[in-house]
Amino acid sequence: MTAAASPTPRRVAVLGSTGSIGTSTLDVAAALPGRIQVAGLVANSKWADLAEQCRKFRPRVAILTDKAAFDAADKSAFPPETALQFGDDAVCRLASSPDVDVVLSAVVGAAGLTGTWAALEAGKTVALANKETLVVGGSLVTELAARRNAKLLPVDSEHSAIFQALAGHTAADVDRVVLTASGGPFRGRTAAELEAVTPAEALKHPTWQMGPKITIDSATLMNKALEVIEARWLFGLRADQIDVIVHPESVVHSFVEYADGSVLAQLSPPDMRLPIQYALTYPDRVHGPTRRLNWRELSRFTFEQPDRGTFQCLDLGFEVAARGGTCGAVLNAANEAAVARFLTGQIRFPDIARCCRAVLDAHDFDPAPTLDALLRRDRWARQEVARWTPTQTSR
Ligand code: NDP
Ligand code: MG
């Protein structure tokens, strides 16, 4: 018997390397040096963190997208083999470079669309954490991936679970998928109680350690709304084939219900390093840094229906997944702007859902937009949120 040849390491560009998903990705890369080679790193402004990552992983390219941070960066903190570059054009060059096999897309927000688009256009495999890319432009992005024969592999834990449970099947075999939701820090609270919650309380997630924007999205359940839209595009499902169930333990990461009534799920502790690793080593399964489920500690799993009356963002997600067109770009931009206003104390927690609803309802709907039309709606929605004020009757 001869030993199996070791695989050639995949050359990975990490867009958003200094964030929560980015640092987890580098943990996986450090644990699997024979499988993953870090080819390039992208951050917005945290140049000192980026420099430290470069000293450890020695990529060919590192990019900052914030000009002031690029100018301020101590260039001598970067190793000589790493070229420090600036801006979105450099991100697109990296994402489409012949020296890159996989682009791990983990920039936060609609800003992630640029690099993801360039990678798909170049036919790269994209490991997609940046769900906003599919929320904003799902139809164009999936059409581009198909046209360029580019693989789009989910990193979001629920979508990775569905992808794993779908192995060997297609949407035609599936009746529906059920996304699990932790319920966030405010599960069980009443609408009246939510009026007074603070950014600090909303930033404390019970099961997942994540960046601030997605942590607020998890508290409003907008994260699950965005994931409904993400699932609609990734798996080619109708909105009425997608459901959400609250599962506070965050161990069962989603369910696929097949035509014959069988239900398949994927389970693991809440740790993003596992879905990241699966996307980077796909289709191989190898030992990695993620701890195992401890079967002695597990006693029961609980499930409950989401409170859609109190957490109104969820309805927005189902509505946008069903309507398509420009709705995703408007909802996503309105939410990003509203979360920023909540975090700076300008609006209350339930105002996030209220102003997203108002801006979505007021927008100029186009059922089959171009990329330019989507980006115009994105800018418009942000301006609308900036001038939105809560009315007395909305509270
Ligand atoms: P973080 O806020 O922790 O990190 C964001 C990263 O993006 C940072 O590296 C940041 O750089 C960089 N960045 C921000 N703006 C830009 C820009 N304009 N251009 C280039 N880079 C930019 O976010 P998360 O890691 O939590 O989330 C990243 C994405 O992954 C989101 O789309 C989120 O929805 C998704 N996701 C996250 C999960 C998680 O567990 N965190 C789970 C599932 C999905 P800098 O540090 O310099 O600001
Ligand atoms: Mg998720």
Image (cartoon, rainbow, N blue to C red):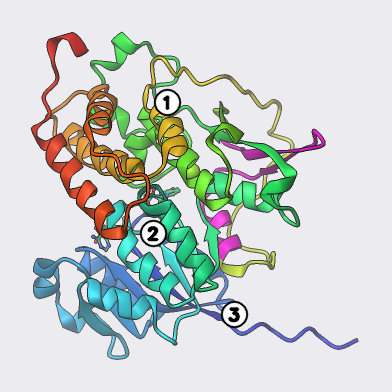
Quadrant where the image shows the N terminus:
bottom right
Q: Mark 2 or mark 1, which has the lower sequence index? A: 2
What residue is shown with label 1? 315
- Residue at the (50%, 63%) spot, across then down: 127
Q: Is residue 343 left or right of residue 205?
A: left
What residue is shown with label 3? 34
Q: Can you name the residue that lies furthest to the front here?
A: 367
Task: Residue 205: tell me if it is visible.
Answer: no
| Mark 3 crowdedness (10 Å alpha carbons): few <14, some 14-19, many ≥20 | few
- Residue at the (51%, 55%) spot, across then down: 155
The amino acid sitting under disc 1 is: Asp
Per the image, is 311 magenta?
A: no
For ligand 1, the image quadrant comes to bottom left
Q: In the rendered image, which quarter is residue 287 located in?
A: bottom right
Camera-nearest label, 2 or 1:
1
Which region is colored magenta?
A: 250-279
What residue is shown with label 2? 106
- Dot 3 lies on which element? loop
The amino acid sitting under disc 3 is: Gly
